[in-house]
Image (cartoon, helix red, strand yellow):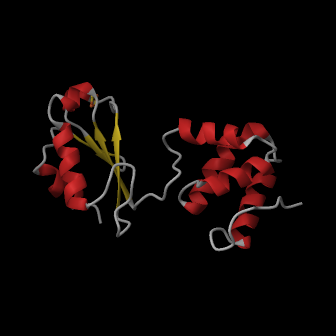
Amino acid sequence: MANECQCKKNEITREQLAQIDSIIERYGARQNYLILVLKETQELFGYLPAQIQRYIARGLNLNPSQVFGVVSFYSFFTMVPRGRHTIRVCLGTACYVKRSDEVLEKLKDKLDVEVGKMTQDGRYSLESVRCLGACGLAPVVVVDNDTHGAVDSVKIMDIINQYN
Ligand code: FES
């Protein structure tokens, strides 16, 4: 039986709820499949807002705080919509001393977006991270799965303009 949603109707449709139900059912509503259920649900919606997390929690008979704990722990889960491309600027020590903060400020200014948010046109999401494991290339920016090293506040715009 489908679990009931307290979500506002205009946020999540019945069809979408049915899709989440089928994901949960496919994993036998077993709690130890939470990460897989979350992963498939995020593929469906693009992100995992609080309403969806609560719905999944009910479906797996978990406390919503347990679901939130997993979503917030793993960086591949997001609670906000992501743009077509995700830009991650490293603010770890090796990158910071090479002025990655200036790269981040340039992006915020030129794209008119705050860290953790998506641009108005849905093209980019901007994130800051603490070390991407490529300190020898500092300062480092990763766009989607591409690592760009020795980036500066001038080069960065040429780099991101390659991503439509
Ligand atoms: S500090 Fe930036 S990649 Fe390590």
159 relative to 89, above or below? below
- Quadrant of ligand 1 in image: top left
- Is residue 129 or residue 150 the one in the foreground? 129
Q: Residue furthest right?
A: 1
Q: For this view, does 17 lie left or right of residue 148?
A: right
Which quarter of the picture shows residue 161?
bottom left
Residue at horizontal 73 percent and vertical 56 percent from the top: 23
Please provide percent x and percent y for residue 136. 21, 27
Residue at horizontal 66 percent and vertical 68 percent from the top: 12
Residue at horizontal 75 percent and vertical 62 percent from the top: 6
Q: For this view, does 116 lie left or right of residue 113?
A: right
Image quarter of the C terminus: bottom left
Instruction: Give the mark count.
Output: 0
Please provide percent x and percent y for residue 79. 53, 51
54 relative to 13, above or below? above
- Is residue 38 or residue 99 the one in the foreground? 99
Which quarter of the picture shows residue 99?
top left
Please provide percent x and percent y for residue 109. 20, 56
Q: Residue furthest left?
A: 154
18 relative to 27, above or below? below
Image quarter of the N terminus: bottom right
Please provide percent x and percent y for residue 40. 63, 53
Q: For this view, does 128 lie left or right of residue 149?
A: right
